[in-house]
Amino acid sequence: MRTEKRKGRGMFVFICIAAFIGSLGIGAVSKVAIKPSWAKKYSVQMTDEIGTVYKDLSYGEGEANKFDLYVPSDVGKENYGLVVYLHAGGFTSGDKSGDAEMLAWLCSKGYVAAGINYTLRTNDNDKSVYSQSMEIKKAMPKVVNEAEKLGYHIDKMAISGGSAGGTLAMLYAYRDAADSPVPVKMMFEMVGPSNFYRSDWGVYGLDQDTDESKKAAAGLFGIMLGEEIDTAFLDTPQYDEIIKPISAFMWVNENSVPSVIAYGAHDRVCPFKTSAHLVNALQESGVDYKYFEMPHSGHGLQNDDKIYGEYMNAVEEYLDKYMPVG
């Protein structure tokens, strides 16, 4: 009987983890497939008139350690701003090529733009949100240096992403900005998880006061952290320090960069409740931010076209303000 109970608990943990990883991938697909009419403005096809794309440049020895660099045709300026966009995919799928239209749009505005791949989590490796965030950090000097080689001197940057890419963008902007090769001036992201408190992850049953729920939470968050988490530390002050390396909101302070963020009130992939900690941290720290809540949307933000358009307008506003093109 005890063996059967242990098997049942193990299956519960497995189901919770599989549901999260699988649904993040589905969410990423929905964001690509569903495009409102106003999105045409941001769906730019790269042309010689806009600039040039240099693909699969290396920043490390890993197979996935590659980035694409979009440089504007208007070469010869004294300085350029860099905008990095990180792809979605639930930390287990996705590719920089899926953001080609966004990167081309950024390049058309006069920025050097970069899409960076990172090593995805699989059943055969131990990659995590933390290891992926460290790859992004490692990539940044290489991206800036490559732009310099091509004649584009970078003096500032912004970073962005959606879903998994949003989480990685926040971690770089809030946790790693001090180590950036150039000043980070702003961050914009959509539906990226910024915290891993099980009380906020009730859509996966992780908030239940049961051994199964606690084991599932420790299992899922441990995979994301890249280290095993003892269930005894869940819901304790010590847990904050354990999970802080991948919890973006914990790194927000009065020096954090201006931010534009968007979340869906019916998101059951990145649980909507997780956004409250981020918003509170930005507000309490006095950060210049804009928050867009989509009351009718889930992870794809597909049911609030007007607000989604307002979000993109704010992105442009903040880019113009904090990343002016010279």
Image (cartoon, rainbow, N blue to C red):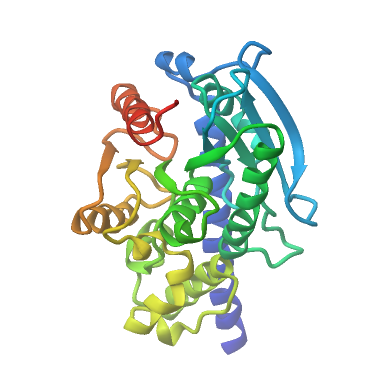
Q: Nearer the viewer, residue 53 or 130?
A: 53
Q: Nearer the viewer, residue 132 or 275?
A: 132
**Vertical placement of residue 64 versus 314, above or below:** below
Q: Residue placed at 52% from the left, 55% from the top?
A: 180
Task: Please give left or right for residue 213 compared with residue 54 in the image.
Answer: left
Total labels: the figure holds 0
Quadrant of residue 130 within the rendered picture: bottom right
The quarter of the rendered structure image containing the C terminus is: top left
Q: Residue 318: x, y in percent?
A: 33, 33
Residue 160 visible in the picture: no
- Where is residue 148, by image quadrant? top right
Q: Tell me the residue at 48%/20% (across/down).
A: 42
**Location of residue 210 with respect to 31 vertically, above or below:** below
| Residue 43 visible in the current orientation | yes
Q: Name the residue furthest top.
A: 49
Residue 305, position in %: x, y?
34, 22
Front residue of 133 and 268: 133
Residue 21 locus on image (x, y percent): 57, 54
Q: Residue at x 26, y 39 (%)?
A: 290
From this view, report whether residue 131 is shown above or below residue 108.
below
Name which residue lies at 73% across and 31% down.
54
Indicate the quadrant containing the N terminus: top left, top right, bottom left or bottom right.
Answer: bottom right
Q: Say if 104 sits above or below 170 in the image.
A: above
**Relative to the observer, which residue lies in front, 67 or 144?**
144
